[in-house]
Amino acid sequence: MILRYNSESGKGYDIVVEAGSIDRIGRLIDLSGKKVLVITDDGVPSEYAGKVAGAFAGSHILTLKAGESTKSLSALETIISSLVEHRFSRDDALVAVGGGMVGDLCGFAASCYMRGINYYSVPTTLLSQVDSSIGGKTAINFHGVKNIVGAFHNPSKVIVDPECLDTLPPRIFAEGMAEMIKMAATSDAGLYESICSWNGDKAELCDMIAGALSIKLNVVQSDPYEKGLRKVLNFGHTIGHAIESAAEGDLYHGECVAIGMMYMSEGRARQQIETALEKYGLPVSDSFNPVSLCEFVSHDKKAKSSTVTAVWVSDIGSFEFREFTQEEIKQLITNRKNEQQHR
Ligand code: NAD
Ligand code: ZN
């Protein structure tokens, strides 16, 4: 199926969500006569970038080191050097083949090379297929601060092939599922039901990915520059980011979001979120000290003032924005930990 991102500027783009679409990429994207740089990393099975490069005459592959530390100025320099060396013009194109790391980096390089060239995205992790590959946010990290240098730059087309997920390690697949549960919990009770009853069927996974993408599309179309509604995508992230900092790399981002959602929901909705998370082997609690978690919350860039705005879910499929003081956040964390001890 084909979804469409409509932008006010008229520069929309298609998102193809189809099993086997990577094998048909030469027919889905017309890059005849153009130079093409395919960017991937060494954790992504090389056959994917190979298929993409094979579809476009005049293309070559740049394989970077896998891992978040590659989202850096030095990798940007490597990409720009390659573009300059191969004399890329503004009519040529980049294609990202990989997860969110490759997508964010490639998108940022495309946003600044010659003041902006086209890029295409072939996301190969569940997280990048449902979340990072659309919305136009591109970035690199700098001096340990995540996504601090970046730009809004939309891809020209996104090719989502769920078959690429076959090679994904289960823990990384589950991480992406946490972000899907996040979207379903705030915005689509039907998607929540599908996630809970999924039995591994490939066609259903394709529909679920399209469902999650539709949610993200609706949100980013109405708030492309993250001034309001787009913050709904941060459900679970306020305390999730604090847990991620406290865990010092032991927990994956999606795992921290999973735990974070448990703090920002109540009643039956919280039980339902827990059921979904446990189905995918995701954690639902942590053992960090409430005081240190609070300190991490206040250091988070989203805590602009003394209060924090967070997304709260009390009914699956809907949400509200709530303001919390630092004291209320501490209370929330302490209450949840007390509840867990008495379970
Ligand atoms: P990632 O890109 O680092 O990929 C995770 C690991 O999976 C890597 O080792 C990669 O080599 C490997 N991999 C990728 N595809 C594979 C496949 N099909 N089979 C086997 N291994 C594969 O991580 P991610 O979770 O996809 O993305 C995280 C990044 O996305 C972060 O940098 C984050 O900031 C960014 N992000 C951006 C947005 C946005 O709106 N731009 C939103 C959310 C996250
Ligand atoms: Zn996230």
Image (spheres, rainbow, N blue to C red):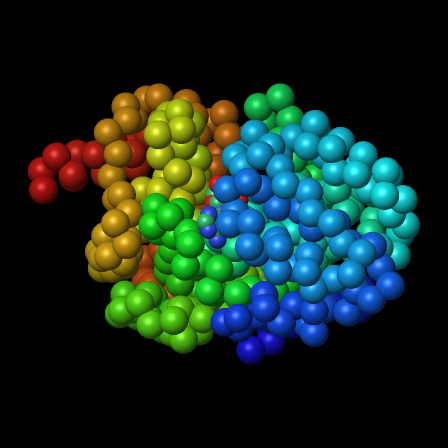
Give above or below for 331 relative to 129: above
Visible residue check, residue 189: no
Q: Nearer the viewer, residue 152 or 221?
A: 152
Q: Is residue 276 above or below residue 37?
A: below
Where residue 246 sits in the image (x, y, percent)?
37, 25
Q: Where is residue 248 drawn, in percent x and y? A: 40, 25
Residue 196 x/y as whole percent: 27, 65
Is residue 166 shown left or right of residue 97?
left
At x 28% / y 26%, what residue is drawn? 288
The number of numbered badges drawn on the structure is 0
Tell me what residue is drawn at x 74 percent, y 62 percent: 56
Residue 325 figure quarter: top left
* Residue 40 x %, y %: 61, 46
Q: Quadrant of residue 192?
A: bottom left
The residue under the point 65% across, 30% down is 72
Q: Would residue 27 be visible to someone looking at this image?
A: yes
The residue at 69%/47% (across/down) is: 61
Looking at the image, the residue that sits furthest to the left is: 342
Quarter holding the C terminus? top left
Taking the view exactly as shown, the residue that stands out farthest to the bottom is 1
Q: Quadrant of the N terminus?
A: bottom right
Q: Is residue 248 left or right of residue 307?
A: left
Horizontal side, residue 244 vs residue 150: left or right: left
Return the residue nearer the eye: 153 or 121.
Answer: 121
